Image (spheres, rainbow, N blue to C red):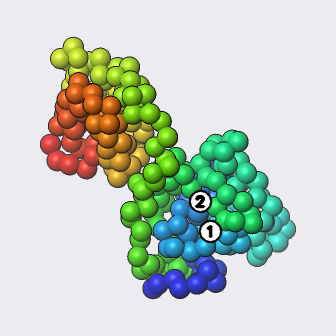
Amino acid sequence: MKLVHELDLVRIAPKELSEYDNVSLPALVAYSLYWLHQWDFRRSIESITILSWRLFPSKFSMVGWPEFPDKERINRSLLQGGPKYRNWLTGAASKGFSLNLRGIEIAQELAGRMGTPVLDNGTIITNKITSEFLGRSSQARTIEPEREAAKAKEGRLFEKWKGGVMSERDLIHVHTMLSVFEHTPKAVREKKLRDLERAADDANDQELQSFLVAVRSGFPWVFGRRK
């Protein structure tokens, strides 16, 4: 079924408590905001509140009134996810909210664990996913390519490659270089590597380009490819 209006958000099914009990409130709100982005709905405080309450009722219901959302808790979570704290999102109640690149990555990690939202009768939501959004942001790449390249070359993985001893056992160093974890979705890992490849190209760093080619060929399963 396709969601056609924000009012349809009240039909979203709650997630199992075990899936999110140990997740921070700002991260849960980022997950909700991510799907509003994807479904091309307004990212208003009202929509974020309703969706977060429907998905995670034990975290965002009013104390003593579980049939109603706690808007103040949503407000605090948005503030904690904002630029002054975690820097995952920007916006204001009067204008709406948007995730930045880091916020998208946080939400994608949760989506990899919890899956996509569904309706309360189990029906799959068929709205077109705006996959371009996952990596599209000219404003997100604010760090100079030279700085990104230099940081990658300071890592242990680059050192081992230079010494000719990089091997499959160095997977942990791949994760460190990309700032990802074992459970991070492959699409996020792929995007992280593409960002480094663009930085190497922009900085005209041929040594780093060769290194990243070796990473791709040496660890194909990390990015969803076969050996």
Q: Quadrant of the C terminus?
A: top left
Element carrying mark 1: loop
- Identify whether 166 is placed above or below 73: above
Q: Which of marks 1 and 2 is nearer the N terminus?
A: 1
Q: Are marks 1 and 2 in contact (CB under 8 Å)?
A: yes
State whether residue 176 appears in this view: no
Res. 19 mark: none
Q: Is residue 155 left or right of residue 215?
A: right
- Residue placed farthest to the left in the image? 227
**Residue on which disc 2 sits:** 98
Residue 113, given in percent of the width and then of the height, sits at: 46, 55
- Mark 1, residue position: 43
Q: Residues within 10 Å of mark 2 (few under 14, many from 20)?
A: many
Name the amino acid type tagged 2. Ser
Viewer-closest of 54 and 191: 191
Q: Residue at x 28, y 42 (%)?
A: 222
Q: How crowded is mark 1: few (under 14 residues within 10 Å), some or many (20 or more)?
A: many
- Residue 226, image x and y in percent? 17, 47
Residue at 45% across, 51% down: 138
Report the side of 171 relative to 100 (left or right): left
Please identify the residue farthest to the top as the structure is shown. Answer: 163
Residue drawn at 58 percent across, 64 percent down: 32
Which residue sits at x=80%, y=61%?
72
Q: Which one is nearer the viewer's eye here, 36 or 185?
A: 36
The image quadrant of residue 54 is bottom right
Q: Where is residue 77 in the image (x, y as percent from the top left)?
A: 71, 54
Query: Where does residue 56 sit, x and y in percent of width and height?
Result: 64, 64
Quadrant of the rendered image containing residue 177: top left
In the rendered view, tell whether residue 23 sits above or below residue 120. Answer: above
